Amino acid sequence: MAEVRLTTPISEEEIRKLKAGDTLYLSGKMFLARDEAHLRAIEMFDEGKELPFDFKGLAVFHCGPIVKQDDTGQWHVVAAGPTTSSRMEIFQDEFIERFRVSVVIGKGGMFERTTAAMKKYGCVYAAFTGGAAVLAADGIKKVEGVEWLDLGTPEALWIFEADNFGPLTIAIDSHGNNLFKDIADIAEKNRPKAYEIIGASKE
Amino acid sequence: MEFAPIIEKVAFNLMKYSATVLPDNAIKAIKTAYEKEKSTTGKAQLGAIIKNFESGAEKSTPMCQDTGIHIYYVEIGADCPIDDLGKFREALTNASRKTTTEVPMRPNAVDPFGSNSGDNTGRYIPWINWEIVSGDKIKITAFPKGGGSENMSTVKMLKPGVGLTGVMKEVVDWMISAGGQPCPPTVVGVAIGGGADIAIKIAKKQLMRPIGEPHPQKEVAEMEQKLLKAINTTGIGPMGLGGNITSLAVHMDYAMRHPASLPMAIAVQCWAARQSAAEISADGKVKYLHHDIKD
């Protein structure tokens, strides 16, 4: 399992070299999008509207940060850990197809649709320790900007400059491997053992 | 005597400390989990969690960006000489509003028919659980609850015929499907009986018990142990990336049930088992129960 340092935008060739289980540290421009921002971006794209900036090759981070604004209007990150990625499963594949982001950062894992899109278009899912918001904020150098503040600060489209943001675990690579699926298979295999402990029948 | 001004100040401190410093029992539970975790990946996740909450406490910064929806539990001693009970709700609401800008906490109160209120308050929020108890003290607990783990909470109306084994099976199945989503290692609150609303209220209250403290009743404590062992056999592990510590504890309780019903509720708490409580005496003196808070 390799330890890799990459700077966005990242080419498909570089992404294809990453394998599930690798550790990634990320630098460069990343943007934050949760449920609402994903929906709005897809909607705008489909209506032929221009997005605030080009997402291609960038990292999208599932995160609703705690931010504060100083007297000059500059925003600062206080805490910025990942949110549960599975909520984005219903449209992450469409998002990857339309915008060709290179890395999706989140926690808790994603499922078949996202894994398939990542294989098809060359993208990876990188897991950050859930709730580790103080550690995450240490890897953010600067808030470059924010769009769509009307969605509220947790849901807005924040643009961060990352500096060795990590450690991230490559949990889904662009070859169809998914660590969370592997663990789910292990849990399934262990289900009868768990039933035995509680005295339940094994059907 | 007027208590509302004290309550506002105390509630602010409680909400602030709950977001920034884990109670000792939670710290101990996670550090013990780190020692017991056998998977390298799982141990690395727990290591990051420990480094993170220690750093948050040092910087007085929220340990998680999801500072939760604001919930208070207020126990009022029946003999407490209170002249301004009607102002308590406003005092707690003001406290939550103030933490939003001063800690800062993330604005987490969203109007389903509108937008984010921006200050953690709004219709029914902060949610306040009121209870009249004996004695002359007021106890306030701040219990901010994160969305990721709350999304894994549930109520099921089981058929009484499935029995207690059926209850345990539901819990195991539910926690297997939750996987890494609720930010394990979790604390799992389980309640049976009462009704749908009663069960989830009791289940959620179990999350406030010191982690791993067994239920005083032997049969219940045994069921807690069996469930914990079963959940930790799954191999889901810290953050769902594999390991032998998926949950830190299972806390269970029950109410009497209707003959036709076996309601069961599961309330899930992420590793950030945040809470802070204080007791206010009849003379207005404040004693903080989880955190060393001055002023």
Image (spheres, coloured by chain):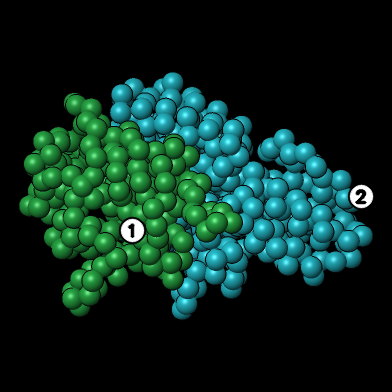
Q: Compare residues B135 and B29 and report the one nearer the observer.
A: B29
Left or right: residue A189 compared with residue B10: left
Mark 1, residue position? A33
Q: Circle 1 sits in a helix, a strand or a loop, which is it?
A: loop
Tell me, by letter, which chain the rendering colours green: A
Q: Indicate whether A10 appears above or below A112.
A: above
Residue at the spot 33% in from the left edge and 35% down from the top edge: A164
Q: Compare residues B213 and B242 and report the one nearer the observer.
A: B242
Q: What is the chain identity of the residue bearing mark 1? A: A
* Percent x, y of residue A101: 20, 53
Q: Colour of chain B?
A: cyan
Residue at the spot 70% in from the left edge and 52% down from the top edge: B12
Q: Indicate whether B280 appears above or below B48.
A: below
Residue at the spot 49% in from the left edge and 24% down from the top edge: B32
Q: Circle 2 sits in a helix, a strand or a loop, which is it?
A: loop
Left or right: residue B2 compared with residue B247: right
